[in-house]
Image (cartoon, rainbow, N blue to C red):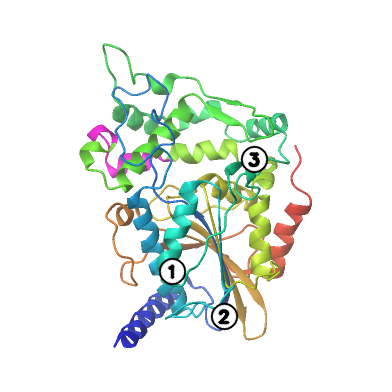
Amino acid sequence: MAGFRSALVAAAFLAAGSAQAADRGDPTDGLKLERMVLVMRHSVRPPTKAVATPAGTTAQPWGAWTTPYGELTPHGAAGARLMGAYYRTFLGARGLLPRDGCAAPGDIVSWASGKSRAIKTAEAFAETLQPGCGLKVAHPDSEADDPIFHPAEGIDGDIALKAALRQKPGVAAEARIHAKDFAVLQRVLGCDPATKAGCGVAEKPSRLTAAQNDTPNLEGALSVASTAGQTILLEYVEGKPMAEVGWGRASKADIQAMLRFHVVKFHYEVGAPYIAQRYAAPIAKEILAALDGASGTGAKLTLLTGHDTNIAALRGFLDAHFTAADYPQDDPPPGGAMGFELLKGGDGKAYVRAFYTAQTMDQLRELQPLTAANPPAHAYFPIPGCAVKGQPTLCPLETFKAIVGGKLKAPARD
């Protein structure tokens, strides 16, 4: 009976996938999924420090969390387990992994950042992706020894700053462009007339500063706005009562507006080609090797669990754009992933398709079970310079290798 139910669920996934493919006009007929790479962001965490934004930038203290700062919350772990369970059935229906039981040794490789929240997210995902199978998550001992997710070489801080300063439209223009978003932020942060705490956040100047052998830092109003918006998002997807989300002054629409600052921050800190092609290079190498079968593992599924900065830099590396669920364009949601499929046709030709998958804000907030009838968001996006005529998201493997390999061999110069 259990096998019959499994077959029905798998059929539902295949039917739903075929209907979505038909709507998109993707040439899935005759193409078989051979390999997949998922570059995941860890799931829900509290702020990384007790006071999320500098003193005086909020009218009231930030809300309390029961989970230590920067660590994966139990709610976030539950969200990752829901995604793992969904991908077990989804990839079983697509023939990449067995529908029941355990994958063969080496078919799945999981590697996480040295940060605890990334490791625990990867472990929670693995727990339901391969229940009872003992799938191990490899990771470095610490962030300091993490060349894939926290690269410390190859970036000249002064050159990186110059590259970031050339990003359009420029930091000074962002306050004008995002005036309406700043108005939302100001209302949510509040303003104490007596102490002036939280008042005039948008009026504080923003600037970029250099960091030695690292990416530039965005400081001032835009930085406060990015951190504040992200913190309020985390309150929402953690499932906190709305009275505790942005001090009871933030709606979901408000959060979506404030999240645009998160994208702005990444645009300047890791978006410039000089920076992106260096910061994302270690992950890009892993993706290329996994898809091409040159990694030495022969893995069908490669899981790389890190941080939003990794995904933002990878987006810049590819010069691509994505929209994940109900988040602003190019904003990497908690627990979501940028994915890459290797597909092969009957004629032996191989293709790559890039996609983004993530739970919607409410799916994560409410810990909704993910099924064929209630799937996480999944959207393919084009890789510039890599397409088949009439199919902008289908990229010949050899072209993908040439694009990625070329940027790895000769990264952008200042």
Badge 1 or badge 3: first in the primary sequence: 1
The quadrant in which the N terminus is found is bottom left
The location of residue 311, given as percent across then percent down, is 55, 50
Q: Residue at x 74, y 44 (%)?
A: 412
The mark found on residue 272 in the picture is 3
Q: Which residue is mark 1?
A: 129
Which of the pair 238/348 is nearer the observer? 238
Q: Residue at x 64, y 66 (%)?
A: 290
Above or below for 180 versus 112: above
Which of the pair 392/200 is nearer the observer? 200
Magenta segment's dominant SS is helix
The type of residue carrying mark 3 is: Ala
Within 10 angstroms of label 2, few (less than 14), some, or many (20 or more) residues?
Answer: some
Position of residue 200 in the picture relative to residue 245 (left or right)? right
Residue stretch rendered in magenta on the structure: 246-259
Position of residue 315 in the picture relative to residue 412 (left or right)? left
The mark found on residue 31 in the picture is 2
Specify whether residue 366 is in view.
yes
Badge 2 or badge 3: first in the primary sequence: 2
